[in-house]
Image (spheres, rainbow, N blue to C red):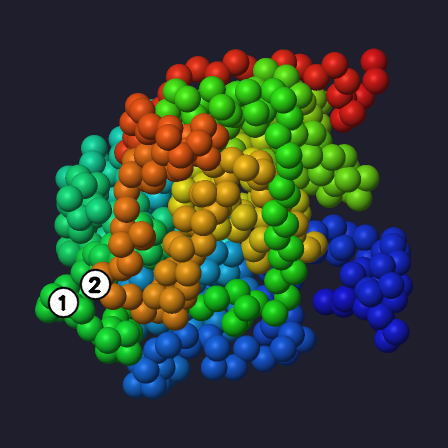
């Protein structure tokens, strides 16, 4: 395919940006519809910088040599692979049971599917994908569009019929962590089950949880297993060990601290991680901006009330649901207007449902959503499709957990996070919905932050967590223990922050008072975010003048 003429102008995508002529219009539309495929083809044709040894991560030479000696059979794969994706698929096939921890946006789904198509080409018939409910539709779509394998949705009212069809016809069964328990006996009774893919594998980081135990049993019974996560470490370093033990318990038989270099050698047979900067030269620039705003009178009153009541959740969202003028809302409207003027689409993330409701009112007709935990998984994908098809200036409004995991939202090139999250991985996953392979524009991330508030305290915590993540996981390493500040529970963090804010606002003599309400539990096992929001705060009123609502 062509991306430009001799002087780089006059053809689709040329640096001069000239509009495509009539002959190229169809090709250009196809490129916009599936840019990741074209980028992969460009890499195969040598039109992108050579990735070289960067695709190998930290694997030892003997494993790299074994992987290089294997030919990947892609006759049942309909998509093109980048070199590092091809390597990951062969890594999974050679090593049998692996954890692929590539940074978000690099294409772990296609890497796993490429491995399945190779197995199918070698007379393996049945495969299983276990994933959060929100991404079942996405997995089914990926199987259908990227492979010649048959996809079966083992979720919802028709799950029993889908199990029958999968057992009879073979292919890829896609189910959820919750549904797997209901169909376990029939799935595990399938003699042809060759490989299980566990998407968002950090969902099974707690070995004591029922779903973790169920997946551990499934992984132990099959020949092949591929765990996918870009966040192998979230709260405690031991969770990284847990994922490795599901795959190869023999690798980590001893307890106690081990040097970083030694640990990397221990987990090398199962763990592969590459960062975006290592292998994705065409990934657009990511620009992150901390947008600090000064509290309005309404913001300040709502925030002080929340601090007095010891309501941590109300403190976090006070700047949006203060019942009057909101500094954060004003800034969000400004960002949305600028995006509209530049033909960009926006996705707005918040932890809280009442914040999303306020955003929907403020943005008016340009807003799509809200995408919350109450929205069925199939409807979530429909909202994403509606947003992707909308004109520039559209805004998808989403709960950060519901929309921040699994869904592909490359149509957005501006991301707004309404309040800091307590886990750095929550924000990273949300940003990666837009900043991933296939994105054609630079991605702007705006974090809305309220001066002299809980936001600053949370950022300090995020900085500590991010530093630990960088030190121990980004280089495919981990350890047995972590700094004390990293292991502190979210409830303890809430109490600490409330006490500090009370002292700051009321003076050194103020007492801590009521204990804080604990934030939500592990994703997927607790009520969706927002249900635990604590004492009610007045809902935002519709603005008198909405700069984004079309005139009547």
- In the image, farthest residue toward the front: 509
Numbered circle sitting on residue 480? 2
In the picture shown, does residue 479 fall above or below 63? above
Horizontal arrangement in the rendering, residue 88 relative to residue 299 (left or right): left
**Residue 207 visible somewhere in the drawing:** yes
Q: Position of residue 249 (x, y in %)?
A: 14, 64
Residue 356, which numbered label? none
Q: Which of the 4 image quarters holds residue 392?
A: top right
Say which residue appears at 63% left-offset and 17% top-offset: 324
Q: Which residue is mark 1?
A: 256
Residue 333 to residue 197: above or below: above
- Residue 500, x across and y down, in percent: 40, 37
What's the distance in space between the residues labelled 1 and 2, CA to CA? 6 Å
Percent position (x, y) of residue 65?
35, 85
The C terminus sits in image quarter? top right
Q: Nearer the viewer, residue 318 or 200?
A: 318
* Residue at figure coordinates x 15%, y 44% from the top left: 208
Q: Which element carries disc 1, helix, strand or loop?
A: loop
Residue 439 at x, y percent in the picture: 63, 54
Dot 2 lies on which element? Answer: loop
Q: Residue at x 36, y 64 (%)?
A: 473
For residue 384, say whether it is visible. no
């Amino acid at each position: 395919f062509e991306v430009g003429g001799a002087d780089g102008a006059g053809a689709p995508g040329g640096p001069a940006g000239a509009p495509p002529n009539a002959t190229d219009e169809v090709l250009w539309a196809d490129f916009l519809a599936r840019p990741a495929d074209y980028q992969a083809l460009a890499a195969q044709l040598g039109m992108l910088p050579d990735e070289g040894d960067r695709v190998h991560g930290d694997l030892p030479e003997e494993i790299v040599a074994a992987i290089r000696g294997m030919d990947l059979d892609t006759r049942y794969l309909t998509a093109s692979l980048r070199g590092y994706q091809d390597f990951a698929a062969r890594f999974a096939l050679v090593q049998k049971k692996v954890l692929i921890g590539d940074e978000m946006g690099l294409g772990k789904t296609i890497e796993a599917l490429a491995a399945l198509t190779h197995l199918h080409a070698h007379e393996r018939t049945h495969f299983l994908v276990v994933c959060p409910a929100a991404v079942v539709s996405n997995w089914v779509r990926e199987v259908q569009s990227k492979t010649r394998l048959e996809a079966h949705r083992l979720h919802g009212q028709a799950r029993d019929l889908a199990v029958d069809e999968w057992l009879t016809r073979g292919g890829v069964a896609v189910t959820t962590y919750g549904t797997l328990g209901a169909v376990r006996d029939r799935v595990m009774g399938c003699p042809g089950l060759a490989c299980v893919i566990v998407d968002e594998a950090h969902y099974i980081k707690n070995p004591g949880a029922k779903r973790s135990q169920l997946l551990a049993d499934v992984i132990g019974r099959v020949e092949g297993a591929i765990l996918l996560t870009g966040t192998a470490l979230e709260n405690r370093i031991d969770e990284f060990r847990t994922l490795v033990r599901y795959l190869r318990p023999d690798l980590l038989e001893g307890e106690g601290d081990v040097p970083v270099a030694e640990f990397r050698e221990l987990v090398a047979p199962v763990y592969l991680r590459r960062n975006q900067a290592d292998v994705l030269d065409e990934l657009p620039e990511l620009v992150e901006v901390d947008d600090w705003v000064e509290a309005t009178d309404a913001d300040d009153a709502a925030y002080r009330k929340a601090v007095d009541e010891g309501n941590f959740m109300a403190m976090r969202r006070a700047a949006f649901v203060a019942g009057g003028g909101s500094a954060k809302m004003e800034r969000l409207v400004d960002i949305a207007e600028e995006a509209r003027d530049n033909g960009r689409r926006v996705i707005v993330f918040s932890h809280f449902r009442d914040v999303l409701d306020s955003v929907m009112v403020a943005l008016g007709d340009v807003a799509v959503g809200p995408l919350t935990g109450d929205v069925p998984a199939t409807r979530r994908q429909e909202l994403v499709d509606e947003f992707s098809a909308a004109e520039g200036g559209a805004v998808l409004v989403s709960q950060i957990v519901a929309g921040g995991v699994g869904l592909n939202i490359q149509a957005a090139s501006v991301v707004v996070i309404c309040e800091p999250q307590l886990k750095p991985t929550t924000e990273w996953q949300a940003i990666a919905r837009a900043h991933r392979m296939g994105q054609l524009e630079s991605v702007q991330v705006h974090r809305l932050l309220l001066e002299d508030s809980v936001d600053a305290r949370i950022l300090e915590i995020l900085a500590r967590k991010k530093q630990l993540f960088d030190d121990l996981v980004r280089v495919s390493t981990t350890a047995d223990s972590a700094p004390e500040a990293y292991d502190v529970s979210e409830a303890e963090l809430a109490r600490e922050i409330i006490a500090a804010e009370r002292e700051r606002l009321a003076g050194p003599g103020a007492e801590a008072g009521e204990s804080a309400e604990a934030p939500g539990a592990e994703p997927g096992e607790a009520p969706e975010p927002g249900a635990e929001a604590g004492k009610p705060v007045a809902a935002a009123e519709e603005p008198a003048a909405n700069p984004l609502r079309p005139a009547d």
